[in-house]
C-alpha cells in the first residue's frame, strides 16, 4: 500500500479549516495586512515566516481574536469569526513570552482553561495529568513558573494551550526564547506532539531554519502580503521571487536579459561574456529582464573549465569562509559580480586545492538556476 | 569601595543627622520628667500616661483611624479602577479630562482642594462630619493609589491577560483571576499610601471636618500652635514608632521574598 | 456594560468631587454679585462633563483678578511665596545633591538601607516633622543652647517665627523629594563614563561638572519641581515656624477663609495660586515626558 502524501491543499475536495477572504487590517494609516486570501487545512503545520513588521503576528492575533479585521472575512471551520471574542473561540495560543501565570503552579496553569469550561474536577485532573505526561512535566506539577527552566516553561505553555484540545493552535515565536541547542531538540518535540494530537498548528517565526524544519507549508510574508506559500522544499528549490530566494537560505542573484532558445532561455548578463543557459516552466518574452537565482551549493568550483558544463565562468577567489564541514568561496567575475560557491571539505586543510587570489572556474547545470521575473 | 571618599561619607553623615536628629530629640524628650521641654530633668514615662488619659486625643485618634480605614479602602477600589481605565481602557470619550482629573490632585495645593470641597459640601447642603472627611480623603488619595497601581500595570505583561482570555475567561474573570493577584502588592502599597495620607492630612480635614469631627492632626495642630508640649512629644514618638516598625517590616518582607524568588530562579537555571 | 461601569464610577467620582468643586471655586471667585448672597446656589449640572467645563471657561473674566493682584497685601503674598519657594528649592538642592550623590556612590549592599532611611521620613507625619523643629529653633531651644554652650554666640538668636525657620522647615520636610529623583538618575549612570572622562584628560572635578551633572539634570529638574510646587502652596510650615510677617499664599488663603470668613476673596486667591502653579506644573510634565521618551 502506497503511503499517501499529506497535501490537502492539492485536493480540490478538501475543506479548509481556516479561510482568509480578502482580509485587510489597518492601524490608523498603517496597513498591516493587505487584501490577503489564504486557506489553511486541518492537521497542517503552517508557518508564517517573515521579517519583523511584515504582518505575521497581526495575522495570528486576528485568528486568536485579539485584533478585529478591518475588511474581509476570517472563517474557521466555515464560521465567520467577526464578532466572536477570544474567550469564545476554539482556538488557543501559545504566547511568545509564554504568558505563564506567575502566581499559579504548573498544574494550575495547565488546568486554568479547563476550569473555565466548568468541567468536573476528576475530568480536569485526568486531562492535566495527560498533558503533563505528554510534555514530560509530571515531576514539576507543583512548581511555580519561576522555579523551572526556560525549556520547561516553554513546555508548560504548550501543555496549557493544548489542554483544551483546540481545533487550532497558534504559536507565536514558540522557540524564540530558547538557546540554539535546545531549540533544535524542541523543534522535533513540537512536530511529534503535533502529530500525536492531530491539532492544526499555525506558527509565527522569523527563523527560516525553524520554519523549514517543522512546517508542512511555509508562507513567506513581506509588508502585509503573502509572497509565496509552498512546502519547505518548493520554497527552497523553486522560489517565486528574488525576495523569497533571498530570505530563505543563501543565494546568488545574477541580473540579465532573457532570449528564447530551443530548449530554455539564454541569459545575457555581461557584455562580451557567453550567456548563461537556464530552463524554466515560466514564459519570458525576448529582451525581458530576469534574475537568475543559484544556491551556492549548486555551484561547482574547479581549476580548469569543465568540458561538459552548460554554464561555466571564470573568476578570482576574493575570500574564503571556512565553516568546518564546508567552505564558501567568494569569487569575483569579470564584471565585478561576486558569486558564492560552496564545496564540501572532504580533505584536510593543508591539502586544500584553492586559496586566495587563485583563478578558478565556476559551473552549474541548466536546471540549477531558477529564473525569476521579480 | 569605588570613589567612596571622605566627602561622600561626610555628606551622608551630615545629611542623615539632619534628617533624623530632630525626630531623635523629640523621642528623647518625650521621656523627660519636666514639663519644660528643653531642659532635661530625668527619665519618666508620665507623659504617655497623661496622653492616654486625655480623652480629646483618644477621641481624635479614633475618628482619624475610622476616616483613614474607610477612605483608604474606597480610594484603593476607585484608584485601581482608574489606573486600569487609564492603562488598559483604550480610547473613550473624555479620556484626556479623566487623566487630567486623576493627576491634577497630586499637584493641587491642599488649601485649594480643601476649600473647593468645603464649598461643594456647603453648596449641596451636606452636613460636615466624618462622612465629608472620608469623601475628601478618598478623592485625593485615590489619585495616589492610581499612580502607584498604574505604574505597576504599565510594566505588566499584557499577554498574561490575553492568555486568560484565550483560555476562556471573560474580561472580568481575567482581571479577577490573573491581573489582580499579580498586581496585589502594588494595590496593597497603594492602600498603605492612602492610609498614611489620610492619617497625616491636616489641611483638607480642617476644611471639610466641621466642628463635629476632629481628627488627630487637627487636634495636634491646635495644641502645637500653643508651643511645644511633652504630651505631643509622647504622641509623636508613638506615631514615629508605629511607622518605623511598619515600614521596616514591610521592606524586610519584600526583600526576603525577592531573595527567595532569586534563589528559586537560580536553582531552576542550574537544574537544566 | 462592565467596561462602562469601570470607566463611569471613578470618572463620575472625580467629576463630582474634584471638577465640580473646582468650578464652584472658579464661579465664586468670578462673580461679584454672588458675594452678597452666599450660599450662592447655581444649578449644579452633575452630568455636565466637558461641555459644562467649556461653558465656564467661556465666562472667565479676568478683571477681578487684575484687581486682586494689584492689592498690595495679596501682591506681596504672591511675590513672597514665590521667593520663599524658590529660595528653599535652591537650598534643598544644595543639601540634597551631595546626599543623593553619596548614596549613588555607596557600596551596593548599603544602598537599600540608605534608600529606606530616605523614604522613612516620608511615611512619618508631616505635622510632627514640622513640629519637631519648634523645640530646636525657639529662643531657649536646642540650637541656641548648643551655640551658647560652644560660645559661638553670646545672646540667643531669634530663628523661630522668621523666614529662616520657614526655609529650614521646607528643606527638612521636602528633602526626600529632592534626593530620590536625583539618586535614581545618578544610580543609573554607568561608572565607566567617569573613568572614560578621566581617561580622556578630565580632572575629577571637571569630570563631575561635564559628565555627572548633565546626566543627572533630569533628576535635578524633577526634584526641584517636586519641592517648588508644593512649597508654593504650603500652609503648615509658615503657620507653625513662620512669624506674623511671613506672607505665604496658603496661609493668607487659610486666614481669609477661617478668620475673615471672606469666601470670594479666598476663592480668588486660590484661583490665582493655581494659575501661578500652571507654569511649573506644565514644565514638570514636559520634563517627565522627555524622560520617559529617553528611557524607551
Image: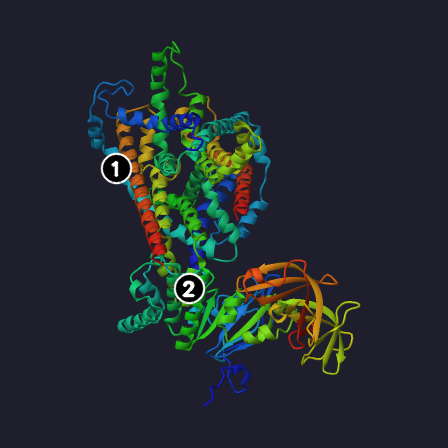
Does B37 sit above or below residue A27? Answer: above
Pick the residue in front: B91 or B208: B91
Q: Farthest residue in the bottom direction?
A: A1
Q: Mark 2 lies on which chain?
A: B
Residue B96 point in image, percent of width and height: 53, 51
Q: Do the residues labelled 1 and 2 touch (CB within 8 Å)?
A: no
Point 40% across, 14% down: residue: C157
Which of the image's four quarters has the N terminus of chain C? Answer: bottom left
**Secondary element at image label 2:** helix
Q: Mark 1 lies on which chain?
A: B
Q: Farthest residue in the right direction?
A: A272
Does B228 sit above or below residue B76? Answer: above
Sequence-first tag of 1 and 2: 1
Point 38% across, 74% down: residue: A165
Location of mark 1 (residue): B59
Residue A343 point in image, percent of width and height: 59, 67
Instruction: Select label 1 or label 2 by which is in front.
Output: 2
**Secondary element at image label 1:** helix
Does residue B250 appear to the left or right of C278 in the view shown?
A: left
Point 46% across, 38% down: residue: C187
Pick the residue in front: B99 or A52: A52
Residue C62 point in image, percent of width and height: 59, 37
- Image quadrant in which you'd find residue B166: bottom left
Q: Is residue A101 shown to the viewer in this render? A: yes
Location of mark 2 (residue): B163
Residue B7 point in image, percent of width and height: 44, 25
Pick the residue in front: A67 or A262: A262
Real-space Cα separation, disc 1 to disc 2, in angstroms: 51 Å
Amino acid at each position: 500500500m502506497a503511503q499517501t502524501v499529506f497535501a490537502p491543499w492539492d485536493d480540490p475536495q478538501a475543506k479548509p479549516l481556516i479561510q482568509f477572504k480578502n482580509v485587510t487590517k489597518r492601524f490608523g494609516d498603517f496597513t498591516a495586512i493587505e487584501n490577503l486570501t489564504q486557506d489553511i487545512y486541518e492537521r497542517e503545520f503552517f508557518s508564517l515566516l517573515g521579517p519583523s513588521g511584515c504582518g505575521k503576528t497581526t495575522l495570528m492575533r486576528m485568528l486568536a481574536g485579539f485584533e478585529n479585521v478591518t475588511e474581509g472575512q476570517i472563517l474557521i471551520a466555515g464560521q465567520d469569526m467577526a464578532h466572536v471574542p477570544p474567550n469564545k473561540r476554539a482556538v488557543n495560543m501559545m504566547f511568545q513570552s509564554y504568558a505563564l501565570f506567575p502566581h499559579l503552579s504548573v498544574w494550575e496553569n495547565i488546568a486554568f482553561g479547563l476550569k473555565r469550561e466548568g468541567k468536573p474536577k476528576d475530568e480536569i485532573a485526568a486531562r492535566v495529568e495527560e498533558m503533563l505526561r505528554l510534555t514530560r512535566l509530571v515531576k514539576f506539577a507543583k512548581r511555580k513558573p519561576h522555579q523551572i527552566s526556560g525549556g520547561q516553561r516553554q513546555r508548560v505553555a504548550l501543555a496549557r494551550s493544548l489542554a483544551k484540545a483546540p481545533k487550532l493552535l497558534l504559536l507565536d515565536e514558540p522557540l524564540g526564547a530558547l538557546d540554539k541547542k535546545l531549540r533544535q531538540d524542541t523543534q522535533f518535540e513540537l512536530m511529534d506532539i503535533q502529530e500525536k494530537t492531530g491539532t492544526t498548528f499555525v506558527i509565527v517565526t522569523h527563523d527560516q531554519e525553524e520554519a523549514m524544519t517543522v512546517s508542512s507549508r511555509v508562507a513567506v510574508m513581506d509588508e502585509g502580503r503573502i509572497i509565496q506559500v509552498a512546502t519547505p522544499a518548493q520554497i527552497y528549490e523553486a522560489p517565486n521571487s528574488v525576495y523569497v530566494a533571498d530570505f530563505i537560505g543563501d543565494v546568488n542573484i545574477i541580473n540579465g536579459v532573457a532570449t528564447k532558445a530551443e530548449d530554455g532561455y539564454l541569459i545575457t548578463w555581461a557584455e562580451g561574456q557567453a550567456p548563461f543557459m537556464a530552463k524554466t516552466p515560466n514564459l519570458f518574452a525576448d529582451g525581458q529582464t530576469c534574475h537568475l537565482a543559484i544556491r551556492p551549493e549548486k555551484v561547482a568550483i574547479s581549476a580548469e573549465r569543465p568540458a561538459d558544463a552548460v554554464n561555466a565562468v571564470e573568476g578570482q577567489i576574493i575570500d574564503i569562509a571556512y565553516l568546518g564541514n564546508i567552505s564558501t568561496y567568494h569569487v569575483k567575475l569579470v564584471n565585478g559580480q561576486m558569486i558564492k560557491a560552496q564545496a564540501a571539505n572532504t580533505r584536510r586543510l593543508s591539502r586544500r586545492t584553492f586559496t586566495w587570489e587563485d583563478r578558478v572556474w565556476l559551473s552549474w547545470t541548466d536546471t540549477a538556476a531558477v529564473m525569476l521575473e521579480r | 569601595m569605588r570613589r567612596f571618599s571622605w566627602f561622600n561619607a561626610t555628606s551622608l553623615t551630615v545629611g542623615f543627622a539632619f534628617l533624623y536628629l530632630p525626630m531623635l530629640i523629640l523621642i528623647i524628650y518625650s521621656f523627660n520628667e519636666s514639663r519644660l521641654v528643653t531642659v532635661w530633668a530625668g527619665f519618666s514615662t508620665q507623659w504617655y500616661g497623661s496622653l492616654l488619659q486625655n480623652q480629646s486625643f483618644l477621641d481624635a485618634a479614633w475618628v482619624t483611624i475610622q476616616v483613614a480605614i474607610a477612605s483608604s479602602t474606597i480610594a484603593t477600589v476607585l484608584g485601581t479602577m482608574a489606573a486600569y481605565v487609564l492603562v488598559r481602557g483604550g480610547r473613550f470619550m473624555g479620556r484626556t479630562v479623566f487623566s487630567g482629573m486623576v493627576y491634577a490632585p497630586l499637584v493641587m495645593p491642599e488649601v485649594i482642594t480643601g476649600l473647593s470641597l468645603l464649598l461643594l459640601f456647603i453648596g449641596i447642603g451636606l452636613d460636615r462630619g466624618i462622612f465629608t472627611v472620608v469623601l475628601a480623603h478618598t478623592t485625593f488619595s485615590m489619585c495616589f493609589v492610581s499612580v502607584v497601581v498604574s505604574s505597576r500595570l504599565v510594566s505588566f505583561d499584557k499577554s498574561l491577560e490575553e492568555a486568560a482570555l484565550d483560555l476562556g475567561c471573560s474580561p472580568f474573570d481575567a482581571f479577577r483571576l490573573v491581573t489582580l493577584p499579580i498586581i496585589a502588592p502594588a494595590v496593597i502599597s497603594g492602600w498603605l499610601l492612602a492610609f498614611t495620607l489620610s492619617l497625616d492630612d491636616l489641611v483638607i480635614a480642617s476644611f471639610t471636618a466641621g466642628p463635629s469631627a476632629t481628627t488627630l492632626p487637627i487636634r495636634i495642630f491646635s495644641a502645637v500652635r500653643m508651643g511645644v508640649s511633652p504630651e505631643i512629644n509622647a504622641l509623636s514618638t508613638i506615631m514615629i514608632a508605629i511607622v518605623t516598625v511598619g515600614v521596616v517590616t514591610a521592606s524586610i518582607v519584600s526583600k526576603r521574598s525577592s531573595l527567595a524568588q532569586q534563589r528559586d530562579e537560580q536553582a531552576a537555571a542550574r537544574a537544566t | 456594560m462592565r467596561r462602562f461601569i469601570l470607566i463611569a464610577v471613578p470618572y463620575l467620582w472625580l467629576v463630582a468631587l474634584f471638577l465640580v468643586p473646582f468650578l464652584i471655586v472658579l464661579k465664586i471667585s468670578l462673580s461679584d454679585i454672588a458675594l452678597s448672597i452666599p450660599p450662592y446656589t447655581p444649578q449644579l449640572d452633575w452630568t455636565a462633563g466637558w461641555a459644562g467645563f467649556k461653558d465656564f471657561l467661556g465666562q472667565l473674566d479676568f478683571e477681578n483678578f487684575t484687581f486682586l493682584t494689584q492689592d498690595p497685601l495679596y501682591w506681596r503674598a504672591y511675590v513672597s511665596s514665590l521667593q520663599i519657594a524658590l529660595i528653599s528649592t535652591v537650598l534643598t538642592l544644595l543639601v540634597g545633591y551631595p546626599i543623593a550623590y553619596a548614596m549613588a556612590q555607596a557600596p551596593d549592599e548599603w544602598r537599600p538601607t540608605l534608600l529606606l532611611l530616605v523614604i522613612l521620613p516620608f511615611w512619618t507625619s508631616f505635622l510632627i516633622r514640622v513640629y519637631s523643629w519648634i523645640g530646636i529653633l525657639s529662643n531657649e531651644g536646642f540650637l541656641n543652647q548648643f551655640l551658647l554652650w560652644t560660645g559661638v554666640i553670646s545672646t540667643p538668636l531669634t530663628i523661630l517665627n522668621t523666614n529662616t525657620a520657614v526655609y529650614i522647615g521646607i528643606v527638612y520636610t521636602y528633602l526626600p523629594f529632592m534626593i530620590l529623583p536625583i539618586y535614581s538618575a545618578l544610580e543609573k549612570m554607568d561608572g565607566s563614563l567617569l573613568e572614560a572622562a578621566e581617561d580622556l584628560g578630565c580632572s575629577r572635578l571637571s569630570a563631575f561638572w561635564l559628565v555627572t551633572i548633565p546626566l543627572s539634570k533630569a533628576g535635578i529638574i524633577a526634584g526641584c519641581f517636586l519641592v517648588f510646587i508644593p512649597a508654593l502652596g504650603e500652609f503648615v510650615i509658615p503657620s507653625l515656624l513662620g512669624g506674623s510677617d511671613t506672607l505665604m499664599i496658603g496661609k493668607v488663603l487659610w486666614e481669609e477663609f477661617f478668620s475673615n470668613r471672606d469666601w470670594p476673596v479666598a476663592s480668588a486667591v486660590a484661583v490665582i495660586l493655581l494659575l501661578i502653579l500652571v507654569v511649573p506644573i506644565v514644565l514638570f510634565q514636559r520634563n517627565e515626558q522627555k524622560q520617559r521618551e529617553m528611557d524607551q
